[in-house]
Image (cartoon, rainbow, N blue to C red):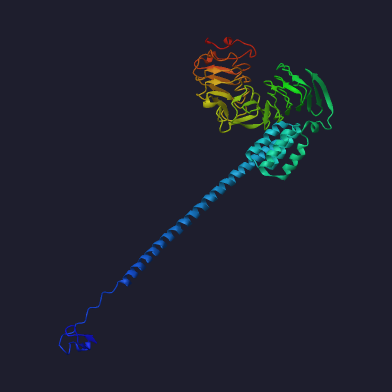
Amino acid sequence: MVSCKNCNNVFDESFGVCPKCGTVYVPEAAPAAVPAEPQLLTFQNEAQMREKAAGKKGSAGKRIAVIAVLIAVIIGAVLTIILVIAGSRTSQAVREQMSLGEKYMSDEDYDEAIIAFEKAIEIDPNNIDAYKKLAEAYKAVGNYTEAVRALRRGYERTGNGELKSMMDEYSLNLGVENAIKDAKVGETGNINGLTYTIYDNGVTVIEGNGSLPDTDKNNVTWRNKKVTEIYFKEGVSEIGRYAFRDCDTITSVHIPRSVTRIGEWAFNDSDRLTSIEVDPDNNYYTSVDGVLYNKEKTVLEAYPCGRYGSYILPYTVTDVRDWAFAGCMKLTYINVESGGESFLSYDGVLYTNEYKALVAYPAKRSGDPEFVIRDTVKEIRPHAFYKSVDLEVIVVPNTVNNVMFHAFEGLTADQTIFLEGRTSVPYLWDSKWTYKCKAEIKFDEKTEESSSVIDYNNYNINEYIPDYVY
């Protein structure tokens, strides 16, 4: 039923016209539909597009991940091969050094055995047998101090219980009372009011109140007494200049609280000395890992000459004694702890800051037999090249303004010092810069006038170097 718009008569829409007034019925247009479905379809299409896009990205990501895994596997395989090869070479090198060390042990050449076992540890710091053999070699020369240190190094590195047991056992032999236990007195004597006792195992006890005097470097009292470990007892106040120089049997020195002065060269050139120990309560000196410093650790007093390998100079050190490294024939490399302001190391050689002065060349440093001094160097310090006999040629640049006394002491006749860019020796150089040096001195353009030092104890430099400039 519908209502006529003209007369409002109600009739059946199927009539088509209003029965009352005859007005034609026209149905009203249906209101426009809300486009919900197309919108939903749009949302669905966008979602599908995102899914497809995500699917593509996911596939690409999977491919990238697979490729990354394959690359990682390949790299890992290559590294494994490299490590296996390197490990094999390392193992072979260690075996060679261990075999060499054991041969030296059987020949009772303990110094060389110590060097071989130390090299084995340098190659493989986790080799337990190397630490054990090293300790046995030190024990063979009566140096329990260094034997315990070797075992401690190994135990701290590896945590091995056997090394710990050996360390505890060897530690019982440290200290003067244990050192002389069951030993027999071999010799007694008196020096400047101090008494000394040398036992048959080489352990020596020096006691009393007073000073061990300075001595003539060519007539050292202890040089031929076959002493090993030296214990100064409380009351000894000074250890004189040259007191134990060139005593090749000394292995360790123990300094009490009462010592207030240690003279220059007191322990230098002692080829087996590996440890200088100081009572912690001493107000003038201290030792760190067997190296002697002043109490504040600002001055390096002496490095044990018998110790093989490298050394790291503490950053606190501002002064190095002229004789500190003299006679250290097993020293291979000198480095400087970060933070120091006074010294630098370059390729194992010690310089002052900014490389202005060359302080010390390690006598056992490996490398080219010709050593060219840096052209920043203005000065070469005393004993800088002391007994550096492995070198063939030392090139001194013309930037060097000063060479100090004994700088090249101990060099031999088959070595050469080449003074680059010079035809004479500068006046400022110390008159004893080549004291006890037999090396040939060569100049630019005047090599035919070069000469070796003949009387190397006492000489006038004018007698063997032409055109000396005053």
**Residue 422 screen position, x and y as percent:** 50, 16
Determine whether, in the image, residue 223 is placed left or right of residue 342.
right
Question: Considering depth in this image, is 97 or 26 the residue closer to the camera?
Answer: 26
- Quarter holding the N terminus is bottom left
Considering every residue shown, the one lying at the far left of the view is 22
Question: Can the viewer see residue 102 in this picture?
Answer: no
Determine whether, in the image, residue 181 is placed left or right of residue 281.
right
Instruction: Using the image, determine if residue 321 lies above or below residue 50.
Output: above
Q: Residue at x 58, y 46 (%)?
A: 83
Question: Considering depth in this image, is 301 or 68 the residue closer to the camera?
Answer: 301
Considering every residue shown, the one lying at the far front of the view is 8
Q: Residue at x 70, y 44 (%)?
A: 160
Q: Residue at x 76, y 20 (%)?
A: 210
**Residue 272 screen position, x and y as percent:** 71, 28
Q: Quadrant of residue 236?
A: top right
Instruction: Using the image, determine if residue 424 lies above or below residue 356.
Output: above
Instruction: Using the image, determine if residue 4 lies above or below residue 162.
Output: below
**Residue 100 screen position, x and y as percent:** 69, 36
Question: Can the viewer see residue 382 in this picture?
Answer: yes
**Residue 59 screen position, x and y as percent:** 43, 60
Callout count? 0
Instruction: Using the image, determine if residue 72 lies above or below residue 123.
Output: below
